[in-house]
Image: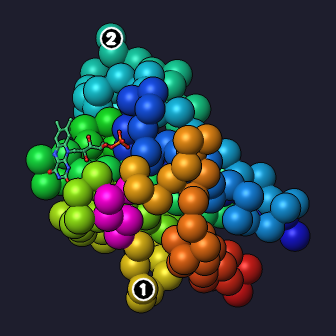
Amino acid sequence: MSKKVSILVGSLRRGSYAAKIARNTISMFPADWDVQIVEIRDLPLYDFDYDDPEITDKPTPAAYTEFRETIKDSDAILFITPENNRTIPACLKNAVDIGSKPNADVAWKNKHFGIISHSVGRMGGYSSQKNLRLALSYFDMVSPGQPEIFLGQSPSLLDEAGKFNNEKTENFVQDYINRLVALVTA
Ligand SMILES: Cc1cc2nc3c(=O)[nH]c(=O)nc-3n(C[C@H](O)[C@H](O)[C@H](O)COP(=O)(O)O)c2cc1C
């Protein structure tokens, strides 16, 4: 049966390596699955007033509602992120926070998820990935186990068209996607 996967990219930059990695992963899912990169650029900064029933002059932004519905409709979420100052970029944390409210209807709850972190240096976005896992640990989400994916020196893994330029990386990422697919279809 066809499934829906939402990919969230933790970078807003036009030339983002995370976005390039994200585009590589789309065709790694089963061909009949609906796999989309979900835009998080225009989500207003999280403000609990929007969700506070006692505050009536600040309605929930339509972008929040649309984002939450997209996540709730998804069978899996794939996060692909760089690291900013040893943690996840603000745009991605904002999206995590928006999906985490209201408490009675958390969009992330019980979802399957995967994380691919990257860095231009050698660490592969280790702290970013671990911080993202820490945030998501609140929502009873399920992800593939080892090996996790930390792509170090990410520019060297991509060709001019933004495709993975070597089989080792491609197979490593494909194996991770296969394990995420197996969780979703179990
Ligand atoms: C504000 C800022 C903070 C950064 N902090 C880190 C960091 O802590 N660790 C790291 O490996 N790279 C860090 N970098 C480098 C980014 O990983 C690099 O710019 C990367 O290309 C961004 O990902 P993207 O290509 O997907 O946009 C930082 C970059 C910026 C702009």
In-front residue for pair 167/72: 167
Q: With 22 as the anchor, is 83 left or right in this view? A: left
In magenta stretch: residue 76: no
For mark 1, give the secondary structure.
Answer: loop
Q: Is residue 151 above or below residue 7?
A: below
In-front residue for pair 83/50: 83
Q: Which residue is mark 2?
A: 57
Quadrant position of ligand 1? top left
As drawn, which residue projects farthest toward the top?
57
Q: Is residue 100 something that shows in the picture?
A: no
Q: Position of residue 102 (x, y in %)?
A: 39, 45
Q: Is residue 159 above or below residue 15?
A: below
Question: Which residue shows up at 42% across the image and 86% down it?
Answer: 147
Q: Indicate the amino acid at tag 2.
A: Asp
What's the distance in space between the residues labelled 1 and 2, CA to CA? 48 Å
Residue 147 got which mark? 1
As drawn, which residue projects farthest toward the left?
85
| Quadrant of the image occupied by residue 134 | bottom left
Question: Which residue shows up at 41% across the image and 18% down it?
Answer: 59
Question: Which residue shows up at 72% across the image and 65% down it?
Answer: 29
Q: With 85 as the anchor, is 16 left or right in this view? A: right
Label 1 CB less than 8 angstroms from ligand 1: no
The span shown in magenta is: 150-154
Mark 1 and mark 2 in contact? Answer it, CB < 8 Å.
Answer: no
For mark 2, give the secondary structure.
Answer: loop
Q: Indicate the amino acid at tag 1.
A: Pro
Q: Earlier in the sequence, mark 1 or mark 2?
A: 2
Q: Position of residue 12 (x, y in %)?
A: 39, 31
Q: With 126 as the anchor, is 111 left or right in this view? A: right
